[in-house]
Image: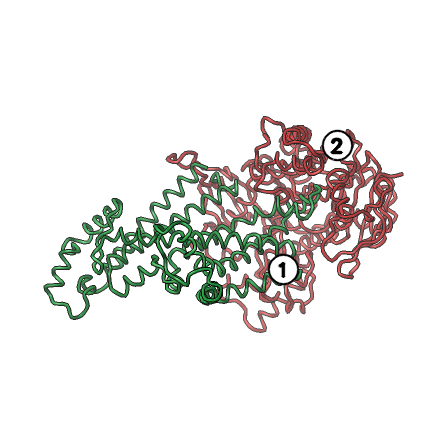
Amino acid sequence: MSLLEIRDLGVAIHGTPVLRDVAMSLGAGEVLGVIGESGSGKSMTALAVMGLLPRGAEARGEILLDGTDLRRLSEAQRCAIRGREVSMVFQEPMTALNPLQTIGAQVAETVRVHRATGRREAEAIARATLDRVGLPAERFPLGRYPHELSGGQRQRVVIAMAIALRPRVLVADEPTTALDVTTQAAILRLLRRLVDEDGLGLMLISHDLAVVADTADRLAIMRGGAVVEAGTAEEVFRERRHPYTRALFAASAHRPERLARLARTPLLEVRDLVREYRVARPGFFGGHDAFRAVRGVSFTIRHGESLGLVGESGCGKSTLTRAILGLEALQGGSVALEGEGVHAGEHMPRALRARMQVVFQDPYGSFNPRHRVARLVAEPFHLLDDPPRGAERREAVEAALEDVGLAPADADKFIHEFSGGQRQRIAIARALIIRPKLIILDEAVSALDVQVRAQILDLLADLSARYGLSYLFISHDLTVVRAITDRVMVMQAGEIVEEGRTEAVFAAPAHPYTRALLAAAPVLELSA
Amino acid sequence: MFRYALTRFVSLALSLVVASLLIFFMLEIVPGDPAAYMLGLNASPETVAALRTELGLDAGPVVRYLGWVSGMLTGDFGTSYTYRTPVAEMILDRIQVSLPLALLALALSTLIALPVGIWAASRRGSLADAGVMGATQLGVAVPNFWFAMLLVLVFAVQLRWFSAGGFPGWDAGLLAGLKALTLPAIALALPQASILARVMRSALLDTLGEDFIRTARAKGLTRGQALRRHAVRNALIPVLTIIGLQFSFLLAGAIIIENVFFLPGLGRLVFQAISQRDLVVVESVVMLLVFAVILVTFLVDLAYAAVDPRLRRPH
């Protein structure tokens, strides 16, 4: 019999069904990968296993742990199981820890909630567990606070809290999605090690096939609240019986057809760019120290070219982007668009700003929710000296919406009426409407599901061919960068450590950091 | 932590200097001669001249400002023109009533509000929650002097447990003093408690939606344990802010309640001094209140750091 067996699980929230007849099983020492796009019911399945469904949710079916139906237990009995027998790790490590308590106290709490141990003993277990997840005592004493740790380190603390009592089942809901590739690889290795050492059953939830592919023994593919295909990882990868599985695989590896013509003339020239920040003074009367976020970066983007920029969080990507856009004052070097200098502040002519537009990661956060799409898309018009008005303006908005594959009638809707992918299309329409030369895409497809992501990549390739657009494509996702760029730059600690034609860099990375990044990136083997 | 406290302290000192300059030169800018203003329209030029000399108005403004500040630093607040007594003595007299009253009201308000707010938040959407929200809405809306009159009617007139007003002085004993301050403190505390309970409730509800509460539940904590161990302290920052503001208000803003209960407090002193144009008293009391407010802000800042480790070291 399996360790964890889910049978006919159905969940409805205020009467609306979100899970239908979900069935999956997980054995001891096994990793069950649960894959699906947003809204497929992965997280709801996890919460149902934990017994932490949101208010208004009603469940039916069975969730058997060693043959005991968890759903029949009282809340008190479930509390006794949570954290001791069945634990959970969440997606967002930055907010998963209580900011006011030390990491030691939070790990020890798992022990003290379940066992009548003294403080000393609980702290000893906490110490041993933190050591186990790769947070040694010398660098990570129990008295550390969460804000003193990086995202990956915090995720290790969350994992330590979950495994302190050596539970039999660990549910990990997108545990690496918010992390950099190298950190992701390390966390996945850690989870796999715990499975092998403790005989833990791990339910690994992800939207990313590649992440699960290397780690999982069994797979369940979910869509619309139901499991569409399940089996051993090998089986599922080989057979791909369900059309949705095939579509998911195809989208994950999708490479848009790119027909843009590359001109010889440079569009954007960045020379020896330096950006420093003042940091807090070390002593009360000491001078300010400067932190160099960008240290002398130079590169060129040509007309019609798509240039990738990859690097881990904190490497200076965002600062560089802001400097190019003329939003940050430089401490050295220069930025020029078609030979015209870009300077932060009032000195930058609007006409110059109009030639560069940007699309950000969060398609919802970058729109005012109280304005209609027509107004949102027409926003960049204020950069023009003679913007179109009245019917002409409306036509421009409708044309821009049609360019990105939306209907002209969408102009009268509000942003909350659209899905994530559609919102990102609107963001692109907004960038496009004043016919810029360069669009900076800052993690623009990172929050999207794979199928939607594939469509947006196609759209970008198409727009580039039609309007001769250039892109600066910033992403932590190496697969996407490989699919959409001509050249790629790798950034580390404020410097470009490697630059070259995308295929050449991916095929034969020269710098050790590039090699480490590529090695850490999960790869989906499609030949299987 | 020490550096945080030090920077806070420096900003406190600077605020005090700016406030004293403002208060002094505001009265300086007022058109006309302070002495003539204090004496009214029918004063003879000789009396005005005499008062000018007495107040030291013949010296330049900078000299007088420095004299005023150094006087305050050594405890010399000048002499009241109306009462002919040292202002320091008058303030000391009144603060013996106002400070205990404000502290008592604040303690009452906090003791009522925090448990009520926590209780309502933990039963969100229930009848109990709705009841608390309704009652606090009423508490915010009804002015405190109305509560005061109601309390007097019930507890002084009907039940005769307390006297209807007046203050016997601390010489009459601690108990008698506290007894005289009880009804006014309750009247002051009720509206404040209503505001504070609502702030506590909404801050707690926000915190309960945070990811780390879900993490705590996943560890096996019950809903109540997660609330007590993880949510309450995280919700305290906005509550501390309101408590700080309330103390400043209670110290100076009790004029109406002091009048209802015939209490010789600071509020009444300022009120009388203004109506009698006793600028020496007004200036000093206002400066004292500003000092109290800034001091409370400083203490609240320290309390923030005590609650939140992220504030202890600057980033």
Shade representing chain B: green
Q: Is residue A412 left or right of residue A346?
A: right
For mark 2, what is the residue? A194
Q: Nearer the viewer, residue A415 or B190?
A: B190
Identity of the residue furthest to the left in this view: B46
**Quarter where residue A186 is shown:** top right
Q: Is residue A294 above or below residue A456?
A: above
Q: Which residue is mark 1?
A: B129
Residue at (25% x, 64% y) in the render = B276
Answer left or right for A263 relative to B161. right
- Farthest residue to the right: give it: A1
Give the chain of mark 1: B
Question: What colour do you see for chain A?
Answer: red
> Residue A448's x, y, as percent?
69, 51
- Which labelled disc corresponds to residue A241? none
Q: Amino acid at mark 1?
A: Asp
